[in-house]
Image (cartoon, grey):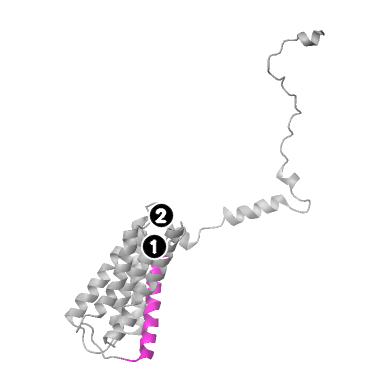
């Protein structure tokens, strides 16, 4: 037998000798010859680092209490400007029952407003809060059925459409006011809560403006504003939750 057969075997393979890995190429080496890398990086820095934040970004960085106060002030200004544009009703004086119901509905708007403006790091709106939004959106419609509360004469279909359009503009603006200060992705549940708050306030202001009464008019054009905003958002939230 040859001496090679008598060499001891250890079961360990000898180390492999590899050539040293060259250092990674620089960005300028990888870029095409017709690309000015320095100019590209300078332009990127100018667009990102040196660009001042927008007004919405600055407002979104405010503390939660200040954002809620700013949203409430904005909603008050929107409602006042809207009422100044469409005008106060000039018919019979409003009754104590009207004032009690309208003020109560407007005060209930605080609950969904606070829920819609919660900080982004807080837990997302729960199913119970979504049900709260749906319930509060239905309150104006239920209030519209109260007998003897809403003064005014019945009117026709054309006035129904015009009155609903005016109210929907107010409700949409009131919905956007608190959400405009929220950074990040807007959730459907927050939209539903903000819409419920806006619908309650818009109902009261519609009654301050519109001189027409009757169950059909108050129910279809005043009491349905919150539902018109909340129902699409609630359906979107349910669809996202089921599909998740």
Residue that appears at 39% across and 68% down:
177
The quadrant in which the N terminus is found is top right
Is residue 170 shown to the viewer in this render? yes
Q: Is residue 239 shown left or right of residue 5? A: left
Percent x, y for residue 59? Answer: 43, 60
Is residue 180 shown to the viewer in this render? no
Check if mark 2's residue and mark 1's residue have beta carbons within 8 Å. Answer: no
In space, the residues marked 2 and 1 are separated at their CA atoms by: 11 Å
Residue that appears at 38% across and 70% down:
231
Element assignment for label 2: loop
Percent x, y for residue 131? Answer: 32, 64
As for residue 15 lying within the magenta part, the answer is no
- Rendered view: 217 above or below 9: below
Percent x, y for residue 213? Answer: 27, 87
- Rendered view: 28 above or below 142: above
Residue placed furthest toward the front: 1
Q: Which residues are magenta?
A: 155-181
- Pick the front one: 197 or 148: 148
Residue that appears at 61% across and 55% down:
46
Which numbered tag is attached to residue 190? Answer: 1
As for residue 171 lying within the magenta part, the answer is yes
Question: Which residue is labeled 2 in the image?
Answer: 120
The chief SS type of the magenta part is helix
Mark 2 vs mark 1: in front:
1
Specify the quadrant of the image occupied by residue 173: bottom left
- Pick the front one: 166 or 48: 166
């Amino acid at each position: 037998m040859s001496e090679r057969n008598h060499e001891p075997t250890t079961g360990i393979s000898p180390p492999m000798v590899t050539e040293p890995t060259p250092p990674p190429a620089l960005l300028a080496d990888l870029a095409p010859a017709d690309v000015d890398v320095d100019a590209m990086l300078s332009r990127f820095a100018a667009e990102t680092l040196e660009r001042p934040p927008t007004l919405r970004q600055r407002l979104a960085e405010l503390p939660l209490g200040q954002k809620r106060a700013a949203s409430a002030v904005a909603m008050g200004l929107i409602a006042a400007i809207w009422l100044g544009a469409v005008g106060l009703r000039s018919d019979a004086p409003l009754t104590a029952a009207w004032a009690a119901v309208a003020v109560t509905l407007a005060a209930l708007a605080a609950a969904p407003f606070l829920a819609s403006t919660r900080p982004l790091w807080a837990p997302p709106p729960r199913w119970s809060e979504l049900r709260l939004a749906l319930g509060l959106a239905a309150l104006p419609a239920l209030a519209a059925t109260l007998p003897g509360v809403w003064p005014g004469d019945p009117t026709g279909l054309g006035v129904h459409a015009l009155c609903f359009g005016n109210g929907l503009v107010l409700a949409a603006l009131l919905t956007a006011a608190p959400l405009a200060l929220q950074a990040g992705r807007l959730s459907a549940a927050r939209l539903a809560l903000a819409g419920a708050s806006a619908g309650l306030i818009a109902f009261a202001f519609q009654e301050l403006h519109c001189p027409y009464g009757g169950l059909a008019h108050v129910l279809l054009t005043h009491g349905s504003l919150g539902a018109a905003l909340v129902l699409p958002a609630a359906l979107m939230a349910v669809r996202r939750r089921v599909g998740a």
